[in-house]
Image (spheres, rainbow, N blue to C red):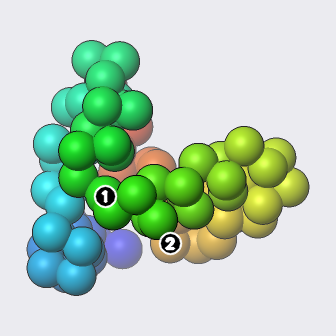
Amino acid sequence: MNNNNFDKLMNDAKKKTGIDVNKMKQAADNGKLDDFINKNLSSQATQQLKSVLSDKEAAEKLLSTPQAKELMKKLMEGK
């Protein structure tokens, strides 16, 4: 995935969810991801996300997708 495709992916994610992924990354970098999630996701989406992340098998399955791997790679490049 090149930078143009990544930017399109991020813009599509923002349009669909209303969440700025860059702001989410900043919150994670600052140790305030929980606050960001609670403020920017519905209570149902927050519960679903926390449920997936607390289930090791479900989290591994989610993070093993090619899209998640590419997203994580791009996010980690900034560190």
Image x and y of residue 13, in percent: 25, 74
Image x and y of residue 15, in percent: 13, 79
Image x and y of residue 57, in percent: 86, 55
Residue at horizontal 26 percent and vertical 38 percent from the top: 36
Circle 1 packing at 10 Å, graded few (<14), some (14-19), many (20+), is some
Label 2 amino acid?
Answer: Gln
Question: Could you say whether the residue bearing mark 1 is in a helix, strand or loop?
Answer: loop
Q: Is residue 45 left or right of residue 17?
A: right
Residue at horizontal 34 percent and vertical 45 percent from the top: 37
The N terminus - image quarter: bottom left
Label 1 amino acid?
Answer: Leu
Residue at horizontal 21 percent and vertical 31 percent from the top: 26
The residue to which callout 1 is attached is 41
Q: Is residue 20 left or right of residue 28?
A: left
3D distance between C-alphas at marks 2 and 1: 21 Å
Question: Could you say whether the residue bearing mark 2 is in a helix, strand or loop?
Answer: helix
Say whether disc 2 or disc 1 marks the residue closer to the N-terminus: 1
Q: Relative to 33, does residue 12 appear above or below in the rendering?
A: below
The C terminus - image quarter: top left
CB atoms at circles 2 and 1 under 8 Å apart?
no
Foreground disc of the pair 2, 1: 1
The label shown at residue 67 is: 2
